[in-house]
Image (cartoon, grey):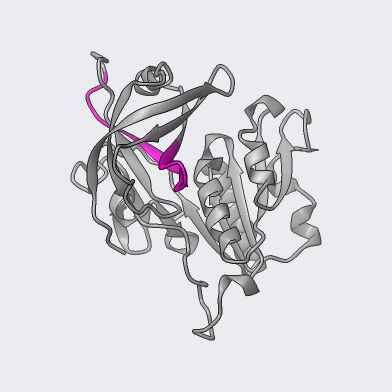
Amino acid sequence: MKTKKYVLDLTVVSAVHLHEKYVHLKLTHEDPLPEMLPGQFVEVRVDNSPSTFLRRPISINFVDRKRNELWLLVAAVGEGTRHLSKLHAGDVLNCVLPLGNTFSLTPPQAVNPSENFSDRKVLLVGGGVGVAPLLYYGYWLEERGVEPTFLLGARRKQDLLLLDEFQQLGRVFVTTEDGSLGQPGFVTNHTILSKERFDQISTCGPKPMMVAVARYAQKENIYCEASLENLMACGLGACLCCVEKTTEGNLCVCKEGPVFDTRRLLW
């Protein structure tokens, strides 16, 4: 699916620090924001940072059409993202958007072409800042009659992000490695996976987590797609820094992804 790309100066409406590592940005524009779909991302220019020369890829967390806002969830883990975490209301952020493909917008492997998502049980599995694109996808599903089930994991309860927003869209199950909230352990240890059967799984987060989720899905013969978080400097498939090995050869995640059927990945 090809969508027109824009280079826009977006104004920061708010920059809320969820804790010392994460900041939630809400951005707007004087004109209506272009169409953006679940799973796509933006490339953000980092201004006034002498050591940051390339744009940073950030998943689209949510698009609020009523307020004409784009939400981004930023983890301050490097010089570029630390600089983004210091933005304030009124600052301007230059973004290229929307980029990449999307999560499944039609039922994957549907036998009946008329089948719709309302007939399916969809599980969205996220870890850390990887929960970001799942919020917009969950909203997209809920708008189409599906109550998504979220399975969210983190090291500790402080690292579980936007739980209130997820709970407004569907059921939320939680794991933490230290047992401070929800069930202790990793997402693939949660009992919901043994109690219920899902038709489809979409996941985003640390690679070891996504690999474990993909293997669970393969074992249970469940369609699974993963949104990869490779380094993506250009977002257009030109710089070749985000190449992933697949069953079809090396592919640029920013152009062919970031969402892949996990059966295509050589994990």
- Residue ID at (56%, 41%): 131
Which is nearer the eye, 26 or 117? Answer: 26
Q: Is residue 94 above or below residue 264?
A: above
Q: Is residue 150 above or below residue 158?
A: below
Q: Is residue 183 above or below residue 78?
A: below
Q: Is residue 179 above or below residue 239?
A: above
Q: Position of residue 191 (x, y in %)?
A: 80, 51
Point out the stretch of residues depicted in magenta: 52-71
Which is nearer the eye, 24 or 245? Answer: 24
Q: Is residue 69 magenta?
A: yes
Q: Main secondary structure of the magenta part?
A: strand
Residue 96 left/right relative to 82: left
Q: Position of residue 114 (x, y in %)?
A: 52, 84
- Residue ID at (67%, 38%): 164
Q: Position of residue 265 (x, y in %)?
A: 43, 57
Q: Is residue 241 magenta?
A: no
- Residue ID at (69%, 45%): 167
Q: Position of residue 264 (x, y in %)?
A: 42, 62
Which is nearer the eye, 172 or 109? Answer: 172
The residue at the far left in this view is: 238
The N terminus sits in image quarter:
bottom left
Which is nearer the eye, 227 or 89? Answer: 89
